[in-house]
Amino acid sequence: MRTSLAILFALCLALPATAANTLNFYFIDVEGGQATLMVTPAGQSVLVDAGWPGFNGRDAGRIAAAVKHAGLKKIDFLLVTHYHTDHVGGVPQLLAKVPVTTVIDHGTNTETGKGADALWKAYEEAIAKHKRMVIKRGDALPFKGLEAKVVAARGDLIEEALPGAGQENPLCAAERRRDEDKSENARSIGFVLQWGKFRFIDLADLTWNKELDLSCPNHKIGKIDVYLVTHHGMNMSGPSAMVHALKPRVAIMNNGAKKGGSAETFEIVKRSPGLEDLWQLHFALAAGQERNSPDSLIANVDPVCEGKWLKMTVASNGSFTVENSRNGFKKTYK
Ligand SMILES: [Zn+2]
Ligand SMILES: [Zn+2]
């Protein structure tokens, strides 16, 4: 009896070694779409968007490689932020390659027309046998051991500030609103993820006015450690009144060589007070050498690339490390 208890005890001690006490992110290069894989400290996996369709299953293959690297056999949650090709288009190919337990989205497609209808049909068919969860603004995403709050969904935004936030934002006076965006971008699911002291924001492709509404006149989000640059760095998103109020230490841009990464967005992000680094999935051709970050912080420097990812590991004390899978360069932010 005593021996078997001792063995059981030894086995229990051995278990935590596999479930590491870190929060991991893979920012997967899908050439200017989104595919962000997160593995929580509780061992749950979440994929935010599945990249593009076509290209011989390129994006599904890149996601599957990250899933394998993370030591996973399946994805627990696939969160589809909105119904544009570079986010939802890759879902059918992904589901044919990697098992997914639950799909999370904002409801039906708000866009119509030939392209939108075809995308929606392919998506609905692909997820027909999956568990599906429709979320709305203010919901908590069902991830164990961390807080993940939906701040935007289907065009609705949180009305109350997150705990500790809500201060008046002096940067609003200089901002101008733009024409209303009636596309799915403005319906993107956006969330703030908090684990201990660490905070991360992903607003997918949310656009200018919605971002201003989250930030003005009172800033509803508060300070963030890592900002996934909205909309791949396109200049129709990411106003400085939001970015500079988020005060990110690190920004990560999921741009392609020719998609996103606009000169204006680089200027806004790089002027953000307290920003230590801007990491990129691609060298952005349109922004010019002088605006792009040093090569060490760029996962893919050539337009024709191997689809290298950036990996981020967050420790329980809130410090985090970003690593470039192309050259092994890594940096820790204490
Ligand atoms: Zn997009
Ligand atoms: Zn979009």
Image (cartoon, rainbow, N blue to C red):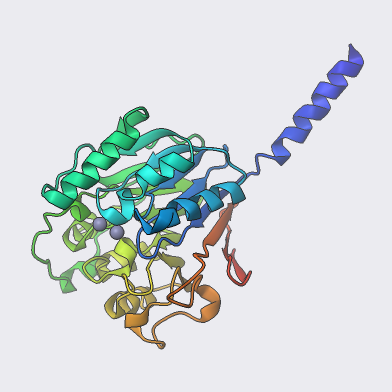
Residue 12 in picture, x, y percent from top left: 75, 28
Residue 226's quadrant in the figure? bottom left
Left or right side of 186 for 42: right
Residue 157 in picture, x, y percent from top left: 21, 47
Q: Is residue 10 visible?
A: yes
Residue 180 in picture, x, y percent from top left: 9, 59
Q: Is residue 135 visible?
A: no
Dividing the image into four equal quarters, which quarter contains ligand 1?
A: bottom left
Which residue is at the far top? 1
Q: Is residue 278 above or below residue 2?
A: below
**75 or 296: nearer the viewer:** 75
Q: Is residue 301 above or below residue 87?
A: below
Residue 14's quadrant in the figure? top right
Q: Residue at x 58, y 65 (%)?
A: 325
Residue 252 in picture, x, y percent from top left: 43, 65
Which residue is at the far right? 3
Q: Is residue 173 above or below residue 220?
A: below
Which residue is at the far bottom? 290
Left or right side of 137 for 33: right
Residue 236's quadrant in the figure? bottom left
Q: Give the quarter of the figure containing the N terminus.
A: top right
Left or right side of 45 for 128: left
Q: Residue at x 29, y 40 (%)?
A: 123
